[in-house]
Amino acid sequence: MFSAADEEQWKIIARHIDESDYYAVIVAQRYGSMTEEQISFTRKEYEYARSRGIPCLGFILDEKASWPSDRLAKDDAERERLDEFKALVKEKPVMFWKDGPELHGKFSISLMKAFTAQPREGWIRSSGSVGPEAMAEVVRLSAENADLRQRLEQAEGASAHERRELVKKTGRTLVQAKSTLSHRERPGGPWQRKEVTLFDVFRVAAPQMVVEHSIIGLSKVLAMEIREDPALPWDTVATNQVKLLMSDFMTLDLVQPSERRHTVSDTNEYWTLTSLGMDVLKFVRRHSIEHGIAQAAKPDEEAEKGSAREDDLPESETSAPTGA
């Protein structure tokens, strides 16, 4: 977490750990600088985070991975200390990685799972963003979707009908689940709250992720969409809430961390649609286009406004809101 200096710096390190929602430790083939207690600073940080009850995520370099010789343990004593530390980290569930891109992908997935399994407050309090009843419904319907996906994968040449049913069921799940987002009009401005459905969010965010899009970029796109008055400026939706939304979409197998390479200086987190996510997006857009054509053919009738509602849906289909 920090470069080793003197013991006085430990107070700064401990304070930062106390203020963290999660602690991630990445272990390769060096033990690191030692403290006066003859353990590495990294191990001391890790043990402190566990003692404070902070959820810890462990990532250990695969033993079969290729690694530079100048970054290996220098002697038997260091190797022994390193093995002891790895054994300590393995007391909790860990992920193994072989290179930078794989570490990036597994880190993103682990963090998203931690958001769901061990939610923390974050910088913007989001404990009320998804109610327990809505979340329970997402989990229940997700299990049904998972069962459908498994049967589709196992059945060679599964029918297009089954795929369409899975897409429709996922669409209904998105309509039923709701979230309250914090957004603001300008940097440093007051936060405002607005309730939306996951369908509303997916309708806006999915086209941005056909290739890939960053959490920061999605936060700004959503802020532009949910503002009350189109004439008002917009800044961002709280990024920790957008990450939770990506976790919900990942649970439904709609999105996944992007595997595209970026420059080392680019620290943004990128997401892209899965195959199912692309099919749901096509379904939403097709119904949006058809709805627009139908409305244009009835000029004397006022077009429906707002987000899709469950009671507006055909019995076996999910309709898209106008303006999609």
Image: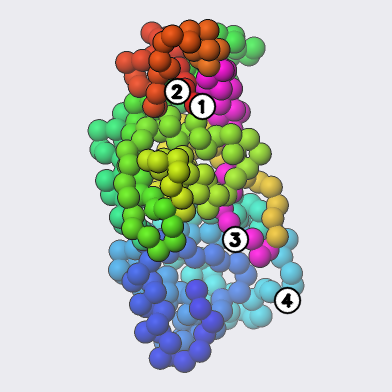
Element assignment for label 4: helix
Of marks 3 and 1, the one in the foreground: 1
Amino acid type at mark 2: Pro
Q: Is 156 positioned to the left or the right of 303 in the image?
A: right
Q: Is residue 242 magenta?
A: no
Query: Looking at the image, do the residues carrying marks 2 and 1 touch, with CB atoms under 8 Å apart?
Result: yes
Q: CA distance from mark 3 to mark 2?
A: 35 Å
Residue beneath disc 3: 267
Using the image as rendered, state which of residue 115 and residue 311 is in the foreground: 311
Q: Earlier in the sequence, mark 3 or mark 2?
A: 3
Give the number of the mark in front: 1 or 4.
1
Relative image position of residue 315 (x, y in whole percent):
38, 8
What is the magenta range? 264-289
For mark 4, what is the residue?
70
Report which residue position mark 1 lands on.
324
Q: Any mark on residue 321, and which?
A: 2
Q: Sequence-wise, which precedes: disc 1 or disc 4? A: 4
Residue depicted at x 42% and y 53%? 185
- Label 3 secondary element: loop
